[in-house]
Image (cartoon, helix red, strand yellow):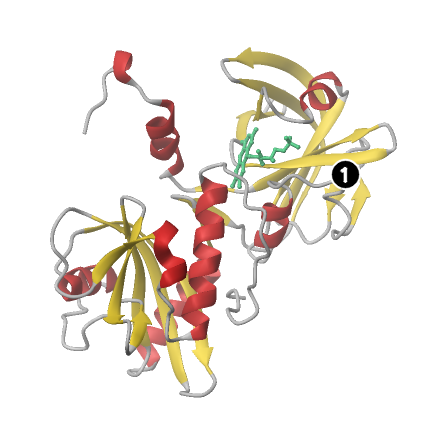
Amino acid sequence: MTTINSAIDPRELRNAFGRFMTGVTVVTTMDGESPVGFTANSFSSVSLDPPLLLICLANNSANYDTFTQSEGFAVNILAEDQTEISNTFARPSDDRFAAVDWRQGPKGSPILSGVCAWFDCSMEQVVEAGDHVILIGRVAAFDTSELGGLGYASGGYFTRALETQAARAIASDARARVSAVVVRDGAVLLEGSASEGWRLPTANQSADASGGQRQRLSASFALGLNDFYIYSVYDNAETQVQHIVFRCRAEAGVPAQGQFVALTELERFQLADSAEQTLMRRYIAETSLGNFKIYLGDQDSGEIQEGE
Ligand SMILES: Cc1cc2nc3c(=O)[nH]c(=O)nc-3n(C[C@H](O)[C@H](O)[C@H](O)COP(=O)(O)O)c2cc1C
């Protein structure tokens, strides 16, 4: 669908921007003796000579003055296992650094431990740009590691390691259960009933998988699927079954089975599998973060292991 200039709705634009894959960073600086930082995916390299990068900061940031007046900042590119750090630095908190290990970089800004890469910068330029300000940094020091980077797209996280793990599991284990969090207009597709319990829709074993899991699930649900990403891979210790869960958006149409349930109504739909229940809680939390609303509840991630 094409939206012409005069009719642009900022919320739709945010969703459109948010569909594409980016890395995830935590941008930091010092406020006197105190470290401050926020999660950002607006990072971009700018120039090699001189060495410049940029990050965009919302004008309504609690740390707007600190960052725009600082002499420098660091960009920490998060590694695959740092989704919790991303969430911490995207939520309001008195001390986002309380639970992370960090040190000051050569230019003085906080460098987080275990990151994929970091860039410690002096402030080159602060450019006002609409409802954000562009912080352009001159890289004074940087380091990279072999760690894979955390990815972000369509309001959720993903990792290359998780993709590889899923592909291996599907190839090597015929019993692997392939399911999906299929959303459309704020609702998620569920199968089952109140009496037998609800579950995420599963790929039909007989559906042709030669075109990949997206086509297999699409054929199983009789729905076109977009924005298709791996979401979780986990073992159920009781049943010895490996679960591979994708997340995607459904096009219009009536699903072959199951029904769409509004995410806001999900509390009333008890999922039979406690791991799926946990996974959906995590999904809702991440979706609200992706929409830049802040999730303030407890996130119980105990039963779902992130890919290594
Ligand atoms: C994945 C992700 C990417 C984000 N990217 C940005 C960004 O590029 N710029 C920004 O200002 N806020 C971004 N945010 C939102 C901020 O992290 C969030 O609003 C935070 O609470 C701001 O904190 P502050 O008000 O203390 O600065 C992002 C959040 C997430 C979860």
Residue 9 in the image: x percent, y percent? 33, 22
Residue 202 in view (yes/no):
no
Up/down of 291 relative to 164, above or below? above
Instruction: Give the structural element (helix, strand or loop) at label 1.
Output: strand
Which residue appears farthest toward the right when viewing the image?
33
In the image, residue 262 lies at what x, y percent? Answer: 31, 51
Q: Residue at x 61, y 41 (%)?
A: 91
Q: Nearer the viewer, residue 38 or 258?
A: 258
Which residue is found at the position 63% from the left and 50% from the top? 85
Q: Is mark 1 within 8 Å of ligand 1?
A: no
Q: Residue at x 81, y 44 (%)?
A: 103
Q: Please tell me which residue is depicted at 47% across the width and 85% down the height of the picture.
A: 237
Ligand 1 lies in quarter: top right
Task: Find residue 31 and report its horizontal and vertical position in percent.
Answer: 81, 28
- Callout count: 1
The answer to which quarter of the image holds residue 66 is top right
Q: Label 1 amino acid?
A: Pro
Q: Is residue 235 left or right of residue 217?
A: right
Q: Is residue 264 visible?
A: yes
Residue 223 x %, y %: 15, 55
Q: Nearer the viewer, residue 223 or 174?
A: 223
Depth order, front residue of 67/92: 92
Q: Is residue 156 above or below residue 60?
A: below
Q: Quadrant of the N terminus?
A: top left
Q: Which residue is mark 1?
A: 110
Mark 1 Cα-neighbour bin, 10 Å: few <14, some 14–19, many ≥20: many
220 with respect to 145 (left or right): left
Which quadrant of the figure contains the C terminus?
Answer: bottom right
